[in-house]
Each structure stands twice: as structure tokens, then as C-alpha cells.
Amino acid sequence: MTLTLAERVARTRLGPPSSWLRRNGAVVFVYLLVVVLYAVAASISPAFGRPENLAEILRQSIALGVVTIGQVYVLLGGGIDMSVGMTARVVGLGVAVTMGATTIPPILVIVLGLAVGAAIGLLNGVLITRIGATPFIVTLGMLGVLSGVALAITDGPTDVVPDFFFTMYDAAIGPVPIAVLVFLLIWAAAWFVLNRTTYGRNVYAVGGSADVARLSAINVHRTRTLTYVISGVCAAAAGIFLLSRSGVGDPGLGQGLEFSSIVAAAIGGISLYGGRGSIVGAFGAVLLVTMSSNIFDFLHVNGYFQQLVLGAIVLVGVSVYRTRGRQ
């Protein structure tokens, strides 16, 4: 079978043609850490190992997990999105205020919220690809703009949202929350797009080498812009879910999601330089970060120390991938 140039670039960036374990070592290591951490925590507290607690951990990981999907697409395409946390906040607050002040059906409000997220991502993508601006600077600037928008929407907690939102969070099929099932389906769809579609291969190719991808007739601007649109939609979905969990529009909603999503991607083996990594590893990293946070809280570890650990992980991830890139 003859491979196109884009497919060869994508496969090359995914790793050297060696053993399965060598190609997927980072993914395997992440899941081993998840299993070990879960076993240790369950041995310390038997209640931690109960199936219902595992379901709750999965539910707590939804917001970070959905945002991480978008961040993975952006990183694989050679960019970064620092505005995801503020996008989640603006959409969450906007949805809460709209529901409290209008009679628009909740479903329509949710669709409008997702559309706002897509528009924010589209603006990020256009500024980066058409103007040639640095992704970090553009999305950091968008973070500042959205911060002002959030304050303009409300500077305090909003009214309680309708019962429809609580149903979204609490509904379950037996012991399994419906939100968790939807979450897993979203991750499966994200994996399918990246690994079984032309667009997914193009994302890897553009992140690996934009010049080579352009020579192989890939529309680099469109491919990168769409990754930011996906990131915006994912961030908006996370904001709506956080709203359903808290029941009120909190001005602190979505705080730190941009940093945590980058940490999860880095732990999961996604190269911070683009074009390399597996979304399967990123999913395991989301579970690892969520579980670690729960254990830190259980052990009453100071939140500042948690941020120190996450920051150190990012620095190590950057160093490792920089070294590999030179090799």
C-alpha cells in the first residue's frame, strides 16, 4: 500500500518503527501509575476502592477531560490554547445568566453556549493562522479579554440554575452516571477522528512539519484553525458541565483548566512541540491528575504544593520532548 506524504510524516512523528512497547511506553507508564495510585489509595482507605467512588472520580474528571481533548488537538497541531479556562467561565456564566433572565429553552441555551465556544476558538485560529501571530500570545491575550467579559457578565454568583441542569449531573444508569458514559463516548469519538480520518492524520502532519504538510497539499491554515474551534467547543462544554455540578454561575468557574489540561497532555505523552503523542495516554493522564488531586485533598496536602508538583511535571515534559526532538 502506498502512503501519502502526510501519512508518512504522521507515522514518523508518532515514533520510531520499533516494538509496540517502545512506541507506547509513555501510555503504558501512565496507566500503570493510575493502577498503582488507585491500589495504594484503596489500601489506605477501603472506601476509596469502592466502585461507586471510582464512578465519582470519573465524574469529577469530566470537566478537565473534555478540555484536555481540545488541548490535545491544538498541541498536536503545533499550537497551544491558554484561553480554555476563561472560555469555560464565560460560557458557564453566560448560560447561567441567560437561563435566569430569559425563557429560552435550556437545550437551546446550551447549543448557543457551545456556539460561543466555537466562535472564540475560530477567532483564536484565524488570528494565529492568518496573521501569523504566536499561539501562546494570542490565546493569552484572549484569556485577558474573556476575563473582562466574565466580569461584565457578573461579578458574583448567579441565581440557581433550573433543575434540568441538576438532572444532567445526577442522572445515572444503575451505578454508572450518564455524564460519565457521554464523557467516554466523546473521548472515543476524539480518538476515532485522530486515528481513523484524514483530518486526524493532517493534524499530526501539520504539527510535525507545517512546511512538509503544505508541500503534500494539506491546507495548513484550515487544519490548525479547526483545532482551535474544537478546543473552544470542548472548553464551552466543560463550562456547562461545571455549571450543572455547582448549580450556580460561579465567577471562579473553570479556574486553572488551561494549566491542568496542558499538564494532563504532557503527562499523557503529547509532545508540547506538536505532531506526536496519543490521545489514549492523555485520557489516562486526566484520570491520574484527578485521582492525585483527590488523594492530596484526602491527605490534607496544601494546594500550593499541588500546583508545584504539576508545574514540575510540565517542565520535565518540555525537557524530555526537547531532548527527543534534537535526537
Image (cartoon, grey):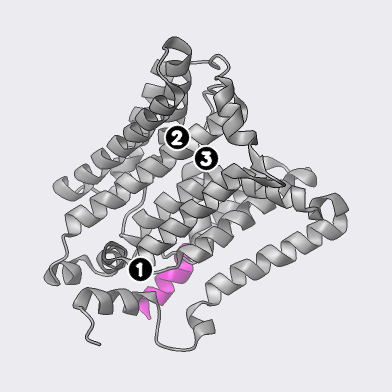
Closer to us: mark 2 or mark 3? 2
Q: Which mark is residue 256?
A: 3
Q: Is residue 57 left or right of residue 184?
A: right
Question: Looking at the magenta stretch, what is its main secondary structure?
Answer: helix
Q: Which mark is residue 126?
A: none
From where the camera sits, is residue 254 visible? no
Neighbor class of circle 3 (other Cα within 10 Å; few <14, some 14-19, many 20+) is some
Given the image, on which type of amino acid does mark 1 rest? Arg
Closer to us: mark 1 or mark 3? 1
Give the secondary structure at mark 1: helix
Q: Which mark is residue 88?
A: 2
Query: First in sequence: mark 1 or mark 3?
Result: 1
Measured from the top left, where is residue 280 in percent x and y?
A: 50, 65
Give the secondary structure at mark 3: loop
Residue sticking out furthest to the top: 101
Q: Which mark is residue 196?
A: 1
The answer to whether residue 302 is above or below residue 105 is below
Give the secondary structure at mark 2: helix
Measured from the top left, where is residue 208 in percent x and y?
A: 29, 69
Measured from the top left, where is residue 82 in percent x and y?
A: 39, 43
Name the quarter where the C terminus is drawn: bottom left
Q: CA distance from mark 2 to mark 3?
A: 11 Å
Q: Are marks 2 and 3 in contact (CB under 8 Å)?
A: no
Given the image, on which type of amino acid does mark 3 rest? Gly
Report the magenta residues as a range: 317-327
Neighbor class of circle 2 (other Cα within 10 Å; few <14, some 14-19, many 20+) is many
Query: First in sequence: mark 2 or mark 3?
Result: 2
